[in-house]
Amino acid sequence: MGEAIYPVPAEWAENALIDDARYTAMYQQSVSDPDAFWATEAQRIDWIKPFTKVKNTSYHAGDFGIRWFEDGTLNLSANALDRHLATRGDQIAILWEPDSPDEAERRITYRELHEMVCRFANVLKDQGVARGDRVTIYLPMVPEAAVAMLACARVGAIHSIVFAGFSPEALAGRVEDCGSRIVITADEGLRGGKKVPLKKNVDAAAAHAPGIEKVIVLKRTGGDVPMVAGRDIDWHTACAAASPENTPEEMNAEDPLFILYTSGSTGKPKGVLHTTGGYSVWVSATHQYVFDYRPGQIYWCAADVGWVTGHSYLIYGPLLNGGTTLMFEGVPNYPDPSRFWQVVDKYQVEIFYGAPTALRALMREGDEWVKKTSRASLRVLGSVGEPINPEAWEWYHKVVGEGRCPIVDTWWQTETGGTMITPLPGATALKPGSASRPFFGVQPLLLDNDGTIMEGPGDGCLVIADSWPGQMRGVWGDAERFFQTYFTTFAGYYFTGDGCRRDEDGYYWITGRIDDVINVSGHRMGTAEIESALVAHEHVAEAAVVGMPHEIKGQGIYAYVTCNADVEPDEALRKELIAWVRREIGPIATPDVIQFAPGLPKTRSGKIMRRILRKIAENDVGNLGDTSTLADPSVVDHLLANRPQLA
Ligand code: WTA
């Protein structure tokens, strides 16, 4: 097919931690003898009590269970902080670049971060937070977000971070679901020069979440936010009064570390649960090998702490590895589209890890914004969150990396804890748009719709045959849902929800979700969630949401809405519904298109035929397939005749 291949540059093959031969040998061992392989890799962690058992996992109904290093004990915060103090106490752990280039940056050493975390851990304990308690974090991109996470890990509490772009309703739902008594927030966030009213949102959420007993408020902008006496606690005052010393709790490897809510095909977002030991080993190993990371290198992951990439590769992976991690509060195009690359130059960033959606947006602004910066410090570029189209890949490689930097296109999920399919910069020849080959211990398989394993090249459903240490361990509060969602579609396999192609060289090409999840700018949205927000509006009788191709966002949100009989839909209602969804879920769920439809295509048994709705949204109306099974085929003609004009 003549697709481009970029061989591993000679100096990379020579100097990288992992070259191709080593990849092959290590991969072989990782799947033929996972116990030996992971026992060795686990030595990267300081265990309080060493484990005697490595892997104890089954995907099958009778003895289902996922346990790694199950009798070992450790504390993640001690591994990310305390053990570095002797050798790198004065090294910068977190570089913080504020939203505006006119504000001062912060440079926080391991010693300073350690003290901040100890103090805040004591604040949590003073508030009665104990092992196993859930703590909700609703903070902007400031170092205190890392402090809050590490302090939870230190005292054995389970953090649940809610992305600071989510609405009060979404926040309240997540707080209630995990039953957290404490919310940690800031007065306001700052993004692209705009203020985000975080404390105000928490106050609004508290009206729906009576379980909130305490709110710890960090001062970020100094905005005038009223404090509720007896409930609200000022972060700085509390930390100043707390002791700078704190002994980390001894946690079992399988004790929960965090919950992170993510969207699936059905129902409300589910609380993906990760535990301590396996996750630590997994994020440390993947961060080191995937980025060829050496301690002290300046590393920048541009993801928000509110998403899994922020958890694993902005905070935990790099700090476990004694890294210097850069946290950027702002957005790629503020004050102008040079911002990312100016930050790269300012800190001499060596490794940059970002999302295709940002690259596509920047690509559209023209090369001059990139070319006016040096970027000579860059060595490796990463991509995550959605398929990267070959055009954006080539631009990233040629313009941003000047042809010098390997690109690691990392495929993974909230559920997988860390990278699963990815090139390694010293080992893998690159094909633009392909996540390439499995990481150590990962056994991808393609299944056809009947569940038969496909050999060789082909297109199928991506499943993973066996467990890896960073795998999620459960859905918070719903053990059955975990098994049901991931292990019953194809019995005995972990089902990813993604479609995938494998080529002649055994490279994997993720084609996108094959369930009712859409990926908007790298953010996962369940169509069911948006639908239930729409039908909550008094004028809406029914709604069906599907994805549509979008040049920048990858996918956009296309909503078909049937109004109540007494309602005449018009432009004003369209605007109102868009604002409504933003308010119910958050701006990331903003519908791109709303098409009013007196009826939706349904089978005689009343099931909405999404296949048809998807085709209309994709403007692929030449072949709608068989519509004869529809209860009322004329519905389709009406939909086709009334497609809104798209910009
Ligand atoms: C998609 C983000 C193609 C995929 C880490 C997956 C990707 C979903 C890639 C998980 C990639 C993520 N290439 N698709 N490199 N990375 N995806 O849970 O559909 O927010 O199932 O985790 O994003 O999204 P999540």
Image: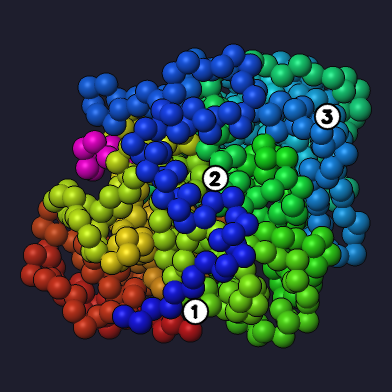
The residue where tag 1 is placed is: 391
* Residue count near mark 3 (Cα–Cα under 10 Å), binned few <14, some 14–19, many ≥20: few
- Picture quadrant of residue 338: bottom right
According to the image, label 3 marks what residue?
86
Amino acid at circle 2: Thr
Q: Nearer the viewer, residue 433 or 183?
A: 433
Question: How far across and down, in percent of the image, does residue 73 sit?
Answer: 58, 17
Magenta stretch contains residue 39: no
- SS for callout 3: helix
Q: Quadrant of residue 196?
A: bottom right
Foreground pick, 68 / 256: 68
Q: Nearer the viewer, residue 182 or 456?
A: 456
The residue tagged 2 is 286
Compared to 330, does 365 lie above or below?
below
The yes-or-no answer for disc 3 within 8 Å of ligand 1 is no
Disc on the earlier residue, 3 or 2: 3
The crowd level at tag 2 (other Cα within 10 Å; few <14, some 14-19, many 20+) is many
Whole-angstrom CA distance, mark 3 to mark 2, is 25 Å
State whether residue 36 is above or below residue 333.
above
Amino acid beneath label 3: Ala
Q: Does 486 appear in magenta?
A: yes
Q: CA distance from mark 1 to mark 2?
A: 27 Å
Instruction: Classify 10 Å Cα crowding around label 1: few (below 14), some (14-19), many (20 and above).
Output: few
Q: Amino acid at mark 1?
A: Glu
Which one is earlier in the sequence, the residue at label 1 or at label 2? 2
Stretch in magenta: 485-494
Q: Secondary structure at mark 1?
A: helix
Confirm or deny contact between disc 1 and disc 2 (CB under 8 A).
Answer: no
Q: Main secondary structure of the magenta part?
A: loop
Tell which tag, 3 or 1, sits nearer the viewer. Answer: 3
Left or right of 403, for residue 488: left
Residue at 44 percent of width and 70 percent of height: 431
